[in-house]
């Protein structure tokens, strides 16, 4: 191994860890099915109802489980073996998606499945994020998070058009069937996962564990600031992302094809973000890399509101994608390296609750503001919120807090083992 590679581990290096490779494969396959499911759900609900409100109902039913179950999920993830939680979630989701194969045109079934799939994902995601540091070394976390993020982005870019084609040519039932199979394959990959034994911890009542997780965030300057930043960013991103199609039509005056290019620009930028980190950054635990992306996205939103050029919108949204991916990877890495292993599930789940709460409020308010202030007003307010989020992070979090584990060395990751 050359010195440069040793100082800056890459994606190829982390994929040599057998157990991380299993986790990576499971998450990637699961993302493939999620893409087919998301596209099929939206298309079928709109075909059945011809109603934008009905489609929004799918989004609401996907968000609701996070708010209802997020705190409980975090406690479960910290109490039980995390790969067992993920396997159970995969098997449950396989059953739900398989049910839709036989009821692809029943609105009640589609809504129920949207809720059920999201409810089990509430357990799967924090378990995966909390488990990852146990499978790689501390200095490999950036590369590991980059690998997971890149695979998710590429899956969406490549498979979203294919999923639409499958729905049109073969029917929604086929797309739901593909989703069911991917969950089964993910569970099989996780079945062979061997995880280092976790440090035994005192078991508390479920309510006490939830309260303890909240206190961990409240008592940490870093974690509490991240919660504030997450909330402000969610209040922005929920509306601007949901109303991008309105922005395309009313501000840029482009058709559906042009809108597709805008989405592609975001995806391309999001795919380039991890490459930027891998090429130029050796340590992401710096406020500039955690909070700078919020500032970048805020500037982009303001620029989008100020200019109506399609070309400038493509460039701006590409940069927005870069900010989204680099910020996400840095955020995960900082949480994984500073939060004690026994609290990670609750911390990740609580941030999911904060994000989805802000997102839901933003989506609801965004539609009203778009009619009252115009779509430019939504993007101006969104940009201002993102700038406020980034500024709060820079002011409240010095670099030392981002490199110091919470409650001492218990926050460090377990060294990787190539089982």
Image (cartoon, helix red, strand yellow):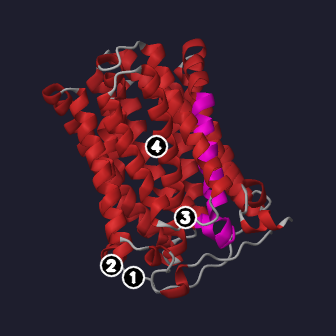
Write down the residue under mark 3.
333
Q: Which quadrant of the figure has residue 156?
A: top right
**Cα–Cα span, label 4 and label 1:** 28 Å
Report whether 340 appears left or right of 5: left
**Cα–Cα span, label 2 and label 3:** 27 Å
Numbered marks: total: 4
Q: Where does the image place residue 52, in percent across and percent down from the top left?
A: 29, 22
Q: Which badge, 3 or 1, is on the more N-terminal residue?
A: 1
* SS of the residue under disc 2: helix
Q: Where does the image place residue 304, in percent across and percent down from the top left?
A: 35, 31
Q: Where does the image place residue 5, in percent across and percent down from the top left?
A: 78, 63
36 to 361, vertically: above or below: above
Write down the residue under mark 1.
204
* SS of the residue under disc 3: helix
Report whether 99 appears left or right of 204: right
Q: Give me the residue at 45% from left, 65% from top.
A: 287
* SS of the residue under disc 1: loop
Numbered label attached to residue 117: 4
Numbered label attached to residue 208: 2
- Can you say which quadrant of the picture contains the C terminus? bottom right
Q: Nearer the viewer, residue 81 or 402?
A: 402
Q: Which quadrant of the figure has residue 302?
A: top left
Q: Nearer the viewer, residue 352 or 272?
A: 272
Q: Where does the image place residue 331, in percent across and percent down from the top left?
A: 48, 60
Q: Give me the residue at 56% from left, 64% from top.
A: 284
Task: Give the extent of the magenta segment.
Answer: 131-159
């Amino acid at each position: 191994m050359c010195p440069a590679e040793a100082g800056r581990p890459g994606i190829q290096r982390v994929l040599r860890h057998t157990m991380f490779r299993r986790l990576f494969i499971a998450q990637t396959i699961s993302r493939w099915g999620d893409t087919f499911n998301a596209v099929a759900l939206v298309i079928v609900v709109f075909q059945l109802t011809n109603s934008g409100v009905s489609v929004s109902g799918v989004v609401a039913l996907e968000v609701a489980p996070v708010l209802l179950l997020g705190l409980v999920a975090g406690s479960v993830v910290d109490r039980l073996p995390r790969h067992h939680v993920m396997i159970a979630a995969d098997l449950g989701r396989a059953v739900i998606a398989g049910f839709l194969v036989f009821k692809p045109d029943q609105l009640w079934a589609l809504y129920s499945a949207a809720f059920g799939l999201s409810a089990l994902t509430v357990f799967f995601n924090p378990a995966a994020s909390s488990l990852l540091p146990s499978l790689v070394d501390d200095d490999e976390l950036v590369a590991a998070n980059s690998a997971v993020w890149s695979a998710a982005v590429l899956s969406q870019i490549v498979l979203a058009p294919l999923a639409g084609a499958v729905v049109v040519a073969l029917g929604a039932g086929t797309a739901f069937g593909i989703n069911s199979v991917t969950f089964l394959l993910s569970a099989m990959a996780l079945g062979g996962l061997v995880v280092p034994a976790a440090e035994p911890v005192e078991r508390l009542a479920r309510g006490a564990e939830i309260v303890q997780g909240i206190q961990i965030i409240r008592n940490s300057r870093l974690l509490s600031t991240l919660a504030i930043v997450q909330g402000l960013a969610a209040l922005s991103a929920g509306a601007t992302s949901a109303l991008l199609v309105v922005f395309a039509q009313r501000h840029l005056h482009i058709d559906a094809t042009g809108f597709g290019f805008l989405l592609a620009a975001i995806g391309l930028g999001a795919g380039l973000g991890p490459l930027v980190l891998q090429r130029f950054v050796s340590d992401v635990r710096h406020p500039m890399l955690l909070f700078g992306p919020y500032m970048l996205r805020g500037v982009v939103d303001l620029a989008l509101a100020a200019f109506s050029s399609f070309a400038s919108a493509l460039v701006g949204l590409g940069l927005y994608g870069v900010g989204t991916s680099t910020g996400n990877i840095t955020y995960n890495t900082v949480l994984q390296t500073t939060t004690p292993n026994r609290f990670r599930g609750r911390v990740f789940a609580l941030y999911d609750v904060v994000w989805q709460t802000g997102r839901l409020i933003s989506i609801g308010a965004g539609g009203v503001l778009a009619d009252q202030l115009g779509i430019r007003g939504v993007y101006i307010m969104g940009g201002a919120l993102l700038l406020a989020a980034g500024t709060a992070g820079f002011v409240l979090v010095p670099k030392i807090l981002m490199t110091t584990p919470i409650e001492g060395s218990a926050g460090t990751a377990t060294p990787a083992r190539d089982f």
